[in-house]
């Protein structure tokens, strides 16, 4: 089936970022396997365009990489002699693209496998849920390449694993395997090799059935509340919670539970 998307999404496809709708789930794929999905400037721009222009029917998204690896990070062949000003603009272009993903319209789940390194880990850290398979490994080779993270990694990675572990990864080139990565907090799910995409899509399908305002609160309000001083956070929480509760969909869902028509919480 061919669907017509926003022109920028068709353009992104020719650059190496494709989008396919599976019901209400937007499946976004990095398609540059010969370069291990290394993120060129064009790919970063394409990611920005895709996440800024997801089709209106999308209610959750998955991002994954074609080939043996999720993403090898910054395209090092483009790391030319930039002066300080150009370097700032380059880094800021990553920030814009990854903010489009993190603070977009829908929750995004990363399906990880193979290398999740450098800018690839920065990209994964901007998603809302990470599903890794047994082949996944995590590293920040920037330290050994004589550079620093520039795609938001110094803000997002410590929130997952802490400043001390990120410092160690960058100072020593330490690589974490899939099992350790899940234990430390890089990924919330760990599945057998080859199964991360299917698991991510299954989670996205479930998320797509949530009330839209609940998903909005989780991706836009929760991370901001977590950064606020407690007294501001409590107020933002009260405002967000009252807005979510007032939606007709919330009323209908609560009524369904009280009438025994909605599933109970179950540990199975
Ligand atoms: C690349 C890149 C890349 C592969 N830029 N071309 N990231 C890194 O320092 C990681 C560098 N990459 C690797 O360590 C390995 O390639 C992998 C572990 C990811 C995969 O290994 P492998 O054996 O499967 O592939 P390969 O043979 O190393 O690479 C295949 C091709 O992809 C080869 O090109 P070819 O023309 O010789 O076939 C590689 O040169 C190319 N390739 N990775 C450019 N990253 C916003 S700031 C973010 C800062 C960073 O991300 S720094 C960390 C960069």
Image (cartoon, rainbow, N blue to C red):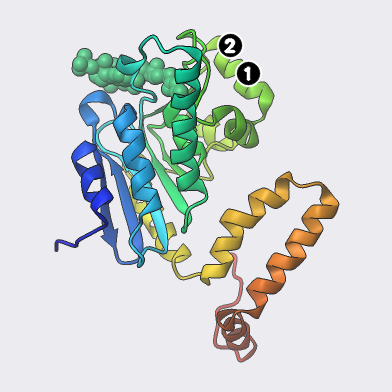
**SS class, disc 1:** helix
- Please indicate whether residue 69 sits to the left or right of residue 1 in the image: right
Residue 61: % across, % down:
39, 55
Instruction: Report the residue marked by disc 2.
Output: 171
**SS class, disc 2:** helix
Asked whether residue 138 appears in the rendered view, the answer is: no
Q: Which residue is painted at 36% across and 66% down in the image?
A: 56
- Please indicate whether residue 110 sits to the left or right of residue 260 in the image: left
Name the one closer to the observer, 112 or 54.
54
Q: Which residue is painted at 39% across and 59% down in the image?
A: 202
Q: Quadrant of the N terminus?
A: bottom left
Residue 48: % across, % down:
38, 43
Disc on res. 102: none
Discs 2, 1 touching: Cβ within 8 Å: yes
Q: Which quadrant of the view contains residue 157?
A: top right
User: Farthest residue in the bottom direction?
Assistant: 259
In this rendering, is residue 119 above or below 107?
Answer: above
In this rendering, is residue 218 above or below 197?
Answer: below
Indicate which quadrant contains ligand 1: top left
Q: Is mark 1 within 8 Å of ligand 1?
A: no
Name the one closer to the observer, 82 or 241.
82
Residue 140: % across, % down:
49, 20
User: Farthest residue in the left direction?
Assistant: 1
Asked whether residue 68 appears in the rendered view, the answer is: yes
Instruction: Report the residue marked by disc 1.
Output: 167
Q: Quadrant of the C terminus?
A: bottom right
In this rendering, is residue 77 above or below 122?
Answer: above
Q: Which quadrant of the view contains residue 215?
A: bottom right
Q: Which quadrant of the view contains residue 68?
A: top left
Q: Which residue is painted at 58% across and 87% down in the image?
A: 256
User: Farthest residue in the front direction?
Assistant: 85
């Amino acid at each position: 089936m061919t669907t017509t998307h926003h022109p920028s999404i068709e353009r992104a496809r020719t650059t190496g970022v494709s989008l396919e709708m599976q019901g209400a789930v937007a499946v976004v794929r990095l398609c540059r396997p010969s370069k291990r999905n290394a993120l060129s400037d064009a790919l970063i721009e394409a990611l920005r365009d895709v996440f800024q222009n997801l089709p209106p029917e999308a209610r959750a998204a998955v991002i994954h990489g074609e080939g043996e690896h999720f993403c090898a990070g910054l395209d090092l062949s483009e790391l030319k002699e930039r002066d300080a000003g150009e370097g700032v603009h380059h880094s800021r272009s990553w920030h814009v693209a990854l903010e489009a993903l993190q603070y977009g319209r829908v929750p995004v789940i990363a399906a990880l496998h193979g290398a999740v390194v450098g800018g690839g880990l920065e990209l994964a850290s901007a998603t809302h849920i990470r599903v890794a398979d047994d082949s996944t490994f995590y590293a920040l080779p920037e330290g050994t390449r004589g550079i620093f993270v520039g795609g938001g990694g110094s803000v997002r990675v410590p929130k997952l694993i802490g400043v001390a572990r990120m410092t160690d990864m960058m100072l020593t080139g330490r690589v974490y395997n899939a099992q350790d990565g899940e234990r430390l907090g890089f990924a919330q799910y760990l599945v057998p090799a080859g199964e991360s995409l299917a698991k991510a899509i299954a989670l996205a399908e479930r998320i797509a059935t949530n009330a839209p305002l609940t998903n909005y609160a989780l991706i836009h309000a929760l991370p901001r509340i977590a950064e606020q001083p407690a007294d501001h956070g409590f107020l933002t929480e009260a405002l967000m919670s009252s807005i979510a509760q007032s939606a007709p969909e919330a009323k209908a869902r609560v009524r369904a539970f009280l009438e025994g028509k909605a599933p109970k919480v179950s540990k199975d």
